[in-house]
Amino acid sequence: MIPAHDTVAWFQVGSSDPAAAQRFYGTLFGWTFRADPGSGEGYDLATYSQQQIPSGGVARLDGDDVGYASFCVQVADVAQTCTRALELGGKILRPAATTPNGLVSAHLLDADGNRFVVFTPAPR
């Protein structure tokens, strides 16, 4: 089932120590993890216990970025959503980028400083 645009369709945890994050969430909730072959290095897919399809992921952080856990909203146009978020008082933390398989995403802050991600899935 393909999620509708403008709905929370994914979650993401950003960690400078993805193995530790995976141990934590795996032990706490029974989630399993595997490398995402379509996104390049540093991203692992998370699958809930008793499920077959991933529902989120763990991203490897580097540089000055701080750890986070956020929801991800599927949108029709990432660039347009970023522009609208700015108009509404939001900020762009990480501008739109495209993964090797074609997924487009951007990290934003809402007007209260809460982090979230918008994305358009890779073409099928």
Image (spheres, rainbow, N blue to C red):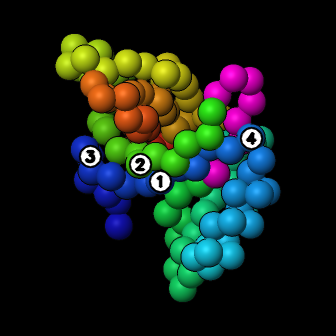
62 in magenta: yes
Q: Which of marks 4 and 2 is nearer the N terminus?
A: 4
Residue type beneath disc 1: Phe
Residue at label 2?
71
Query: Looking at the image, is mark 4 or mark 1 nearer the viewer?
Result: 4
Question: Bounds of the magenta span?
Answer: 58-65
**Looking at the image, is 1 positioned above or below residue 12?**
below
Task: Quickly name the residue at label 4.
Answer: 16
Question: Which secondary structure lies at badge 3?
Answer: loop
The circle drawn on residue 11 is 1
Horizontal side of 73 relative to 96 (left or right) equals: left
For the residues labelled 3 and 2, the Cα–Cα distance comes to: 14 Å
Of tags 3 and 2, the one toward the viewer is 2
Q: Which mark is residue 5?
A: 3
- Front-lying residue, 55 or 38: 55
Choose the circle earlier in sequence order: 3 or 1. Answer: 3
Rendered image quadrant of residue 35:
bottom right
